[in-house]
Amino acid sequence: MASVNWWPYLLILLVFSLITRVYPLAAFAVMLILISAAARAWSRRALQLVIYQRKLIYERGFPGETLTLSVIAENRKFLPVPWLRVIDMIPEAVGPQDERLLQITHLPEMGALVNLYSLRWFERDRRIFTLLLRQRGIYRLGPTALEAGDIFGLFENRRDDENYDYLTVFPEPLDFEDLGLPASDPFGEQRARRRLYEDPNLMMGVRAYQPEDDFRRVHWPATARTGELQVKVYQPVSARVMVICLNVMTMPHYWDGANPALLEYLTRVAAAVAQRALADGYRVGLISNTCLAHADQPFRVPPGRSPDQLARLLTALAGTTLFVTSTFDRFLLHEAPRLPYGATLVLITGQTSQELREAAMRLRQRGRRVVLLSFDERKPLPVPGVTLIHRPFHP
Amino acid sequence: MSAETVVETPNMAQKFWRWQPMTAALLLMAVELMWVTPWYRLVSQLSIPPPLWKTTLILAVVLSSAYLISYGMEALRLLRSIRLGALGALLALQLIFVPLALMGGQSPITTAEGILRLDLGYLLAITTVLWLWRRGATLGSALLRPGLAWQRFGQGLLALLAYSFVSWQVQPVGVQSQGDFLLFSAYLFIGLLAVTLTRIAFVSGSVRQRKNPFDRRWLLSVCGVLGLVISIAALVGSLLTGQYQLLLQAASVILRGALVVGLFLLSLPALLFSFLIYPLALLIQRLPRSTPTPESDLLGPGGAYPPYPMEASQGGPLPLPLQVLCLFSVLALVVLFVYLRTRKTLSQTAVILPEGPESLLEEGDAARLARQALQDWFEGLAQRLRPRARPLIAVRIRQIYVQLLQLCRELKTPRPDSATPLEFLPRMAEVFPDREQDLQTITQLYLRVRYGEYPETLADVQRVEAAWQRIAEEGERRKKNAVIQLAKS
């Protein structure tokens, strides 16, 4: 507004009034110079030591839940801030429960939460909002623009703060029973549940050598002491590992576009499978042919059975986007060497192409146990050795 | 804290914010009048000078009626042609009646005749009406934004400065200056308040929140700060330009005005409650007394005392002023009690509510922080000045070292070009064996200044100067001895 610099004109006025000996005019010029200087100084210092922060008690939840967001503005100096406007960018999907509080912006699916403050010296003002989680995803709150000015309303100052907070909206897991998987053996091979593995890091004793034993398992000190061949006995570890492989490609070809509803459904299915598998004692991992949200890292969650593994999996699923890094068949074959041996691979896909069937078959040939959960509208052809479950998706 | 405590209906939200644009518009109209009226009165002196109050009132009606009609039409979202028609009708009425009103019936001719005869008074009045009509209409239809307020404030400021200049040239010295000073200060106050309020109205126009930070307390604070800054600016401006007489005159006018207003406000309760006080005073007078007093001739036909005046007698009722005082004391106590209770309740509510403003200062923090801020400011100032002092210090140390070399040269011990200061130090120590410590001080500090990047301080300079003073005295003695020895030889 007052971008025009007053001072040269006021100085000219002062000199003119002194030359023409109109002293009241000179007094007015001095008054204006002083007021202008005070306004400029106030405006420049208005945003100094002004802090704006968000406080979220919980940073994740399921769609339909509400979270409390506190926004705090602080003035940590003696100079008061007569007016302060804070424009906080909030995604509409996690906006306030009262949608009218969020103003429209030029960015798609983003709104502006505008708050006005008037802060005296060393004052804090807190506002509380209730956010409604509307849609699955990982959402970034911020950045923030702070605008303030002098008490005369002449000058304005602006500061952009790159302060971000993240909100995770998990996918709502489907009811596992609704998937219609076989109740006795939902993930294909029951006999895998009894399979025992040994952890070479955990030795629990020695025993006499038998011809079928591997020569590398011989315990040489014990052999020397006893005079007979002794082999190490390792701690048995039951390893029921499952890796959920999610295909985010919802159309036969990437140039066909995407089907967001199908992707939502697939993530809900993946969440349901992960939940059930963890409950059944599996170590569950997750891979997908997309990127992690707000990162360029590959989408890969190693198998685990820790208490927070479900939250980790749901967080990853929350960040699933329509961005496809490669076709699912190539992705599977590329990732297969990194997956733990003996793990059950649950392929969740909305498209069952010939290439995918071939990839599944090749995985099977390499000794993998594969379950193909297809939500394709067309019934896919059976793949030898692969458990195929077809549940066509109807939006 | 549930959402219901924060969110409210849009109607409620709008209700909280509505006063700002209206007040801003009102102040902008006042700004307009504050420069148009003096100009009109100044120019109209050539014809028929109308009284100030009358001119202001008429022009205010012109401006505000155009604004209100334009604003109303805009709010009703009527067709453009209807809006223009209504405003045109208003203009026609104003053009017919306002010049007549401004002339105050002193002119024997009508407006039409005045225009036809090119009467200066009428032409001026018509021009003023046209200007104010346009300003009011555009203000009512435009979005109230800071740029608009700033533009109007700036235009008015220029006009007022020009008015002051012309007025100074036209009027005799001392007649207009005092009024100008007051007018300019008032213009600054109202204009800046209008700009501030417009900005607040603009930034809060689309915001929906229940708590309005720009409440009455905020407005009072802004007015206070604005008044203070303008007063200080006026004081400094008048003192710097030798216009203290104007300032004193203006201050006396303001003080007189404030005194009158204050007295009026103080007496307002008495005026308002006079109908209550009078019967109460009568009732108090009629209270039974312990000792009967002889009947007075002053008693009226009903046995009652006349209302006023009344002589105070020993053992009789309290004099009326004392009775009024008692009544006011009781009223004041009641008001104080209610105020304290309300304040206590509000403070309790403020503690319970999790949102809203709160002070970051605890007891004793303010003084500590003020001290800290002052200290920081001084340190910042020193930091800013230090880089300027550093070169001076460095120059002084280097200068002393050059003087030391000069002295050595005079004492037949020049420094070879190939010798570094540290290599030359033992040679100097041979010349001044008693001043080895001083020589080391000068050489070391010279090295720091010349080759090092260490910050030098004022204390370093003082040490070098003290050392140099001692060496210089010693050198002078040596030179005298050398001269004496030369003379003897």
Image (cartoon, coloured by chain):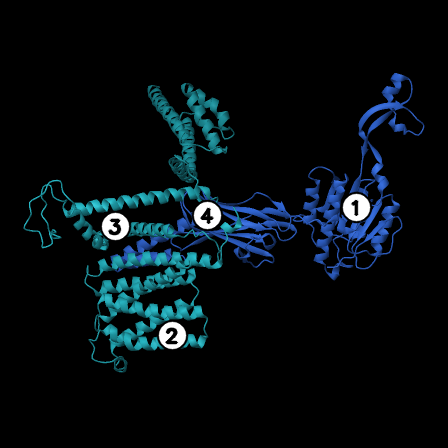
Chain colours: A blue, B cyan
- Mark 2 to mark 1 CA distance (whole Å): 77 Å
Drawn side of residue B323 relative to residue A60, left or right: left
Q: From this viewpoint, is residue A232 visible?
A: yes
- Mark 4 to mark 3 CA distance (whole Å): 33 Å
Res. A47 mark: 4
Query: Is residue B361 shown above or below B197?
Result: above
Q: Position of residue A328 (x, y in %)?
A: 79, 52
Q: Position of residue B481 (x, y in %)?
A: 35, 20
| Kind of residue indicated by mark 1 | Glu
- Mark 3 to mark 1 CA distance (whole Å): 83 Å
Question: Which residue matches tag 3?
Answer: B239
| Kind of residue indicated by mark 2 | Leu
In which quarter of the view is residue B407 placed? top left
Label 2: state its secondary structure: helix
**Marks 4/2 same chain:** no
Nearest to viewer (mark 4 / mark 2): 2
Please give the chain letter of the residue carrying mark 4.
A
Question: Which residue matches tag 2?
Answer: B87
